[in-house]
Image: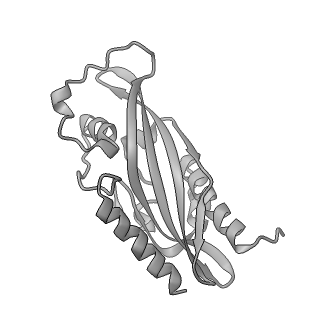
């Protein structure tokens, strides 16, 4: 049995969450969340049961995800919140062309220690930026600029590709262009963590 301090244990829980999600290891993914956990992403907001084993069309394609070192804010003995930069690449088809959608997000986790074990109580995404490129350089993506001019910059291409595939997406997702809303998320996470 490995003896880990709280910070290391928290880092391992959130890093494992990302790896299990990408690998579709649903039993393992379930094990890092508390049963009453909630998750807020681009395609759903609700209990953990609405997240594990589910997703959008782009999640059925090849996904490569890389995370940066998480920053742990442990503000009490049993609660902390964590910021973790996340970069995900999705290979998709758009207008008959293979494309790569690259998403830059900041994930905010609330983690809680119960009966000596750290698990995730809540996770939400803050959208920072995205890029869309052809998988084969030089290929025309056949995009009309008028179709994307009203889409928000933090997740413009995710919104565009999803709607082109027949899906839907809110134009009010949490993004870095909403400074007051982002500040509120941090303030609420800090207040929650201090209550442990």
Q: With respect to residue 168, does 161 lie above or below?
A: above
| Residue lying furthest right | 1
In the picture, measured across the screen, residue 99 lies left or right of residue 111, that is left
Drawn side of residue 175 relative to residue 6, left or right:
left
Nearer to us in this view, 111 or 167:
111
Question: Looking at the image, is 174 positioned above or below residue 76?
Answer: above
Decide if residue 46 is in sight here.
no
Camera-side residue of 68 and 121: 68
- Give the camera-side residue of 70 and 59: 70
The answer to which quarter of the image holds residue 189 is bottom left
Tell me residue 92's x, y (percent).
40, 30
Residue 187 x %, y %: 41, 74
**Quarter of the image where one finds residue 145:** top left
The residue at the far left in this view is 146
Residue 30 shows up from this direction = yes
* Left or right, 32 with reference to 175: right
Residue 38 percent coordinates (x, y): 43, 70
């Amino acid at each position: 049995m490995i003896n880990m301090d709280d910070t290391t244990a928290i880092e391992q829980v959130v890093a494992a969450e990302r790896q299990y999600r990408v690998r579709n290891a649903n039993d393992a993914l379930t094990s890092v969340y508390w049963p009453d956990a909630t998750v807020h992403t681009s395609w759903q907001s609700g209990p953990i049961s609405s997240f594990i084993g589910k997703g959008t069309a782009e999640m059925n394609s090849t996904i490569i995800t890389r995370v940066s070192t998480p920053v742990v804010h442990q503000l009490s003995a049993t609660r902390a919140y964590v910021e973790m930069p996340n970069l995900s690449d999705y290979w998709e088809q758009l207008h008959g062309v293979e494309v790569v959608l690259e998403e830059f997000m900041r994930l905010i986790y609330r983690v809680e220690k119960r009966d000596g074990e750290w698990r995730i109580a809540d996770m939400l995404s803050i959208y920072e930026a995205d890029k869309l490129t052809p998988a084969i350089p030089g290929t025309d993506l056949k995009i009309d600029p008028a179709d994307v001019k009203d889409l928000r910059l933090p997740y413009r291409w995710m919104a565009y590709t999803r709607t082109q595939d027949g899906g839907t997406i809110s134009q009010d997702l949490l993004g870095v262009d909403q400074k007051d809303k982002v500040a509120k998320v941090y303030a609420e996470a800090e207040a929650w963590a201090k209550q442990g």
